[in-house]
Structures are given as structure tokens and as C-alpha cells.
Image (cartoon, helix red, strand yellow):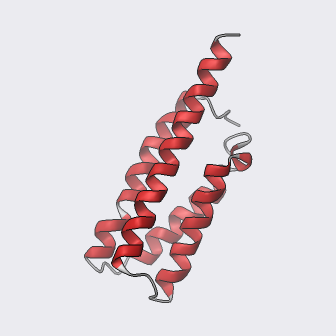
């Protein structure tokens, strides 16, 4: 199991930003794989709890997971406007960036001991 300040986790956050951003053009193109893509991100995000120690205690992670889950449900019901989608995608990106910053700070604090 990885700890949150692990370099692999920090790099993963960059990858996750890219995956979340990908949602927006898929939505704008009305891509048939959009719902599946978002659902896959939800599953991956749930799985993160089993790979990264204590990530489930991070409020940004919980908010990210809840937002992705909500997006998935609303998309499958076709109840998400372009404005809402854009707002939520950028909200998720900011949450992941905050998770990455927190992980770096944890690493810096650990190194100072």
C-alpha cells in the first residue's frame, strides 16, 4: 500500500487531472462513451482507497468521489447541462490538484523530521 506522500501517488494525481479533463470534450462531442468513461473514473477513484493509505480520510478525495458519482448518475439520466458539466469538471480538477499539494506537503513535513 502506498502512502499519500509517495512519488507514485503524486504522479498519479497528474494523470488523474488529465482523465478528468477528458470528460469535457467527450461531453461537448456528445461521445457515446462519456457515461462509461465517467463511470470508469468513479470505479478507479473508489479503488484508490485500497491502494493509497488513508486517502479515504481526505475530505478533498471524498468530495471528488461524490462529485464524480453525482456526475455519473446525472449523465445517465441526461440531466446535466453544459454549464454544470464544465463547472463540475473544473471543480474535480481543482480537488485533485489540492490532493497533490497535500501529498507534497506531507512529504516535505516527513523529510524534515
Against 112, is 28 above or below? below
Indicate the quadrant containing the C terminus: top left, top right, bottom left or bottom right. Answer: top right
Residue 15: x percent and y percent? 43, 45
- 28 sits left or right of 113 in the view: left
Q: Residue at x 67, y 50 (%)?
A: 59
Residue 50 visible? The answer is no
Against 74, is 70 above or below? above
Residue 54 visible? The answer is yes
- 109 sits left or right of 85 in the view: right
Dividing the picture into quarters, in which one does residue 107 lie?
top right
The count of marks equals 0
Residue 31: x percent and y percent? 31, 78
Indicate the quadrant containing the N terminus: top left, top right, bottom left or bottom right. Answer: top right
Q: Residue at x 68, y 33 (%)?
A: 3
Against 43, is 72 above or below? below
Q: Residue at x 48, y 43 (%)?
A: 97
Residue 105: x percent and y percent? 58, 26
Residue furthest left in the image: 29
Instruction: Between residue 96 and residue 87, name the one nearer to us.
Output: 87
Residue 49: x percent and y percent? 69, 50
Residue furthest top in the image: 113
Instruction: Between residue 71 and residue 15, name the one nearer to us.
Output: 71
Q: Residue at x 54, y 66 (%)?
A: 68
Amino acid at each position: 500500500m502506498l502512502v499519500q506522500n509517495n512519488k507514485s501517488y503524486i504522479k498519479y494525481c497528474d494523470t488523474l487531472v488529465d482523465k478528468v479533463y477528458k470528460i469535457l470534450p467527450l461531453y461537448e462531442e456528445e461521445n457515446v462513451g462519456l457515461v462509461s468513461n465517467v463511470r470508469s473514473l468513479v470505479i478507479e477513484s473508489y479503488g484508490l482507497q485500497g491502494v493509497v493509505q488513508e486517502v479515504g480520510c481526505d475530505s478533498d478525495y471524498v468530495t471528488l468521489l461524490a462529485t464524480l458519482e453525482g456526475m455519473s448518475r446525472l449523465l445517465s439520466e441526461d440531466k446535466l447541462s453544459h454549464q454544470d458539466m464544465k463547472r463540475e469538471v473544473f471543480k474535480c480538477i481543482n480537488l485533485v490538484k489540492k490532493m497533490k499539494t497535500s501529498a507534497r506537503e506531507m512529504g516535505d513535513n516527513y523529510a524534515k523530521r
